[in-house]
Amino acid sequence: MKVILLCALGMSTSLLVENMKKAANEQGIEVEVVAHSVDQFEKYLSDADVMLLGPQIRYKYRSLSKAAEAANVPLAVIDTLAYGMVDGHKVLKQATDLIKKKGN
């Protein structure tokens, strides 16, 4: 599973990426988690199983959602509290839940 986190510059989510990797390791989930600038959305869309937007760029959701839907890639805004707490477990769960929902 490949999870792509999108933020303003691709750097502010680096600690969250590491915490998500730790959470996945603890749970035995095979996952690749990376962060990129939202400006690179189209470049990485076809490579993602799920894409999550940082809360600070939630305003981009509407403009990106049609392309994500067309590519069959779930797109959501990261839970603000989980983002602020850098809660890798909660954000990983959000990502896996979106992928499961896609499968139904």
Image (cartoon, rainbow, N blue to C red):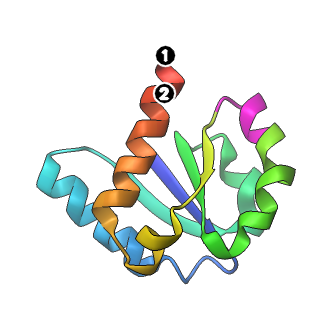
Q: Residue at x 49, y 16 (%)?
A: 104
Q: Percent from the top left, x then y, of residue 85?
A: 37, 79
Residue 1 visible at all:
no
Front-lying residue, 43 or 15: 15
Magenta residues, start to end? 67-72
Q: Residue at x 54, y 56 (%)?
A: 4
Q: Eyeballing the image, is 78 above or below 46?
A: below
| 49 sits left or right of 30 in the view | right
Q: Disc 2 and disc 1: Cα gap in Å?
A: 5 Å
| 16 sits left or right of 101 in the view | left
Which mark is drawn over residue 68?
none
Local packing at callout 1 (Cα closer than 10 Å; few below 14, some 14-19, many 20+) is few
Q: Residue at x 80, y 62 (%)?
A: 60
Q: State the residue position of label 1.
A: 104
Q: State the residue position of label 2.
A: 101
Answer yes or no: do the residues labelled 2 and 1 have beta carbons within 8 Å?
yes
Q: Amino acid at mark 2?
A: Lys
Extreme-top residue of the structure:
104
Front-lying residue, 50 or 32: 50
Quadrant in the picture for the N terminus? top left
Q: Secondary structure at mark 1?
A: loop
> In the rendered image, which quarter is residue 36 located in?
bottom right
Secondary structure, magenta segment, majority class? helix
> In the rendered image, which quarter is residue 59 located in?
bottom right
Q: Percent from the top left, x then y, of residue 12?
A: 54, 83
Q: Amino acid at mark 1?
A: Asn
| 49 sits left or right of 15 in the view | right
Q: Residue at x 66, y 29 (%)?
A: 72
